[in-house]
Image: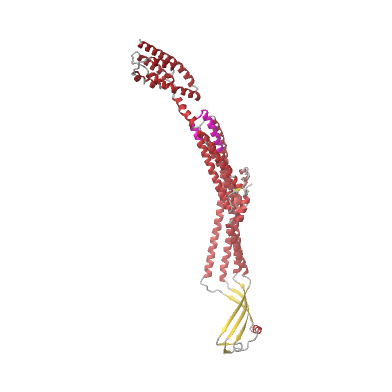
Amino acid sequence: MKKTIIFCGLLCLCLSIQAQTQTRRRTYIEKAKDPRPEQVQSQSAQTEEPVQRVTVQVKEEPKEELPAQPVIIRKEQEVSTSAEVLPQSKEEVVPEQPIIQQKEPTPVQPVVETKKEPAIPVEQPKAEPKREIPKTVTPPVTQKKETPLVQPEPDYAPIQEAVQVKAPLFAQGTGKWTLRQCVDYAVENNIDLRQQLLKVKNAEIDLSTTKNSRLPDLTASVGQDFSFGRSTLGDNTSQSVNSTRTSFGVSSSTPIFTGFRIPNQTKADQLTLFSVTEGLKKAKENLELQVVSLYLDVLFKKEILKAYQEQVEYSYQQVERTKILFESGKIPASQLYDINAQLAKDELNVTMAVNDLDLSLLNLSQALNLPQTENFDIEEPNLGDVIYNNISSVIPPDQVYNLALGIKPHVKEAEYKLQSSEKLLKVAQSGYWPTLSLGLGYSTSYRTVSGQDTPSFGKQIKDYGSEYISLSLSIPIFNRFQTRNQVRSARLNIENETLALDNVKLALYKEIQQAYQSATAAQAKYSSTAKAYDAADESFKYAQERYEIGKSTVFEFNEAKTKLLTSRSEQIQAKYDFLFRSKILDFYQGKPIDIE
């Protein structure tokens, strides 16, 4: 009787399980077409508990009966029909064989429990691999990974404050400097220019000395003699007495003819003065170019910093949007981590750009020799359309070269040095000529003799006074080949200065060619980078729209943003490169360098 009751209970249980399996499989197929994270979480919570109840239900089967085996086989067959969709059902039926070996006397318990849990074997096959992914990812992210989502806000805020506070510190106190103010201050306070100015003054002194060599000289002399023993007295007698004699004299000499040495030396020194003066102008222009280069470098670093700050703003906004997409279950947690990493990288780029800007400002302030550089900053001019405003400066190199030959100081410096060396050759050749000079003089004396009466001082000065005029002619015959070697050395110096002038002209033409080529290349690069930036901007906007609706990954978005930043950086670099090259061409044309 007991066996019959158990068999009937098991048969009813199997029939009910078969019916519910068919109904659940239909509902599952319908829901599988549009799965949602909320339904997945609710189903996952239901499937976890029935899995444990299956083990309880099966373990409580009382006896090992032969009639029960075909029922179990039917159960396996019924479940296998659903295994076509979910193949995990066979693995859960296998443990029934060892469980059948357990023997328990109470047959009522399995019947009651099976009625309470009819859906247990059906929920097990519904745990598809596709639904196991949100089960393992969604719960730990909502509990453990929400805390780092708030981190980008405090991480971003200090860096944003550093960028916003550190830049205005330069503008406090001294104000912002224009390019012309920087150039004027550098010229007034540069030590190299002061040393060059001393060279100019020294050349002026040498020229003055050469000019004054035409003037007669004037020399006064005083002598004192003591005589002991026999000496000649004033009456032309020789006596053995002690006497003293004081002599006075004035002499002058005037060069009359020096073989044209003085006029040639004067012209040579005058040309040397012109050369040194042009060297001073050259030093000023080089300093001006250096200041302009550093000034434009600061402007370039400021624009690069603004571009990086914009990227940080984009990344920060995308972090907030990614958090919303993640919380709604549209994207996995990995994309949120990737966008946070990209934000940290962009913030690092901002920090490095700020450091580069500080270094550029320091280089400019050091070039100006400022005593304090803490609050130093420059004014950012409105450049407008760089190509349109400076395209007139880009003219062919030959025209620029012809203009530069007549105005550039380093060309004039080399020319004056060559002309001075030619005059120095004539100075050396003056050694072959005789020299004629005129001499004038007056002398007198006062004497005292021991044991004799001494006339008054005035009478002796008048009596012993004498004047003379002389002409001196010096004819060089042999001076150990000094003049010949000096002439040879002067000729070699002329050849050297000629080569130096040719080298300066050649270097000038090369510099103008390079400046022109660089300007045209920068112009073409700027036009190309403008098109590339427009294309990258459109691509970035499209990638941003796709990412905001969850149709693209973080890698695709970051790639588009990196291309946009690269195009922007190249465009800024090409703009300032063209501006600097055009200013160099203005410099060679003699135009003042200024940025409005």
Furthest-front residue in view? 106
Q: Is residue 131 left or right of residue 231?
A: left
Placement of 64 over or under 238, stated as above or below:
above
Instruction: Name the residue nearer the viewer: 213 or 341.
Output: 341
Q: Residue at x 59, y 56 (%)?
A: 190
Asked if the stretch drawn in magenta spans residue 336, the answer is yes
Furthest-top residue in view? 1
Residue 421 image offset from top left, x and y in percent: 57, 63
Instruction: Name the residue nearer the viewer: 355 or 418.
Output: 355
Q: Quadrant of residue 21?
A: top left
Residue 33 image offset from top left, x and y in percent: 49, 21
Magenta span: chief secondary structure: helix
Residue 529 image offset from top left, x and y in percent: 56, 40
Residue 274 appears anywhere in the view: yes
Q: Which residues are magenta?
A: 311-339
Quarter of the image with the N terminus in it: top left
Q: Is residue 414 left or right of residue 98?
A: right
